[in-house]
Image: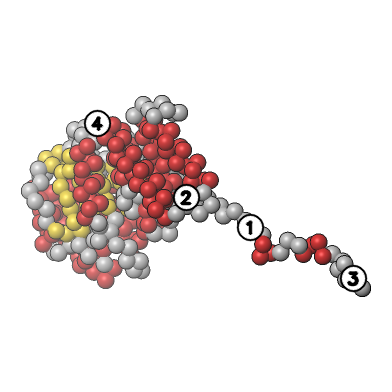
Amino acid sequence: MGRRPVPGRHQHDVRPDRQRTRNPPVITLRHHLLTVVAVFLALAAGIVLGGGPLSDVNQSVVTAGNDDEPAPAADRARTDYTESFVSALGPGAVGGRLAERSVALVTLPGADEQVVAALAEQVAASGGSVSARYELSDDLVDPGQKSLVDTLGSQLLTQQAEGDVAAEASTYDRIGQLLGLAVATKDVEGQEVNGKARAIVDAVSGAGLMAKPDEVSQRAPLVLLVLGTDARDEGADAILAGLAQGLAAQSVGVVLAGTTADGGDGQLGRFRADPAASGVASLDGIDTTAGRVATMITLQRSLATPGGAFGASGADGPVPLG
């Protein structure tokens, strides 16, 4: 006797373990950022879409979208190509943007030295100059050392900055403004270092809150504040906000810059939720060539327009377009 057909068997002919679903294309955030900024920089350099190197970048993105599972080596090669592409276009895109303007480079503890050096090189490539490097110490941003910072700030306010810094300023806003008086100026042309500036630097460095820089001759209109290690200590975010806000009060413009990891829920991302962010431009992605180029464009923008969130996770886009 033949076997009777099992009702509904055809419903089981295609089994779950035989189903094949194409994986979505894998394009990293870093790759996406670099590609977007590369397109912008290409436009800034006058390259015509549809021909030349830019068409290769577009093709790279399309190819990535057609791969089921891009091999790590292939993905790395695409990222390296985009980095090289932006590096080649960078000088043409930033050249002259900071002409005859100086930038005070202020770094927080743990800032990557290679990235800091690369940022200084980009300032020079943009026609500007770094007035000095000011390295803030661990004690300055340690919530446990607030009493020291508060006492020093009160003394300097009375001795050097009465009338320049509001007496009711909070501890870290006040020390930020005092540092601003020493390293920056509201004059877009920059100003010579005066006795007040030297006295503040001597006092802050003497208290172990900052490394004393080499001989400095000028106070800069722009401040580039570079993030370091995200300690995530309670009170650390308020310290950063106070410092940035204080520096912004005494300068033409401040750009707070961090790596791609600093965006999102990192320290830079959290800063963007603070009211102090309205007067301070922020940018994440300085660990990439594109991010460093975008930092120069953001510095130029800050000469006329404060604020803005740019970079890999910036709400205002990867780079200022206006």
As drawn, 24 above or below 3: above
Alpha-carbon span between mark 2 and mark 3: 55 Å
In this rendering, the label closer to the viewer, 1 or 4: 1
Residue drawn at (28%, 31%), measured in percent from left and top? Answer: 92
As drawn, 91 above or below 156: above
User: What amino acid is found at the position of numbered circle 2 in the picture?
Assistant: Ile
Label 4 crowd bin: few (<14), some (14–19), many (20+), radius 10 Å: some
Which residue is under mark 2? Answer: 27
Which residue is under mark 3? Answer: 2
Which residue is under mark 1? Answer: 20
Mark 4 or mark 1, which is nearer the start of the sequence? 1
Residue drawn at (38%, 33%), measured in percent from left and top? Answer: 53
Residue 175 image point, x, y percent? 23, 57
Mark 1 or mark 2, which is nearer the start of the sequence? 1
In the displayed structure image, the side of residue 125 where residue 192 appears, left or right: left
Which residue is under mark 4? Answer: 96
Q: Cβ–Cβ below 8 Å for labels 4 and 2?
A: no
Residue 298 in view (yes/no) = no
Residue drawn at (20%, 62%), measured in percent from left and top? Answer: 137
Helix, strand or loop at mark 4:
loop
Label 1 crowd bin: few (<14), some (14–19), many (20+), radius 10 Å: few
Residue 320 image point, x, y percent? 38, 38
Task: Name the outermost residue toward the bottom.
Answer: 1
In this rendering, the label closer to the viewer, 4 or 2: 2
In this rendering, the label closer to the viewer, 2 or 3: 3
Alpha-carbon span between mark 3 and mark 4: 88 Å
Helix, strand or loop at mark 2:
loop
Mark 3 or mark 2, which is nearer the start of the sequence? 3
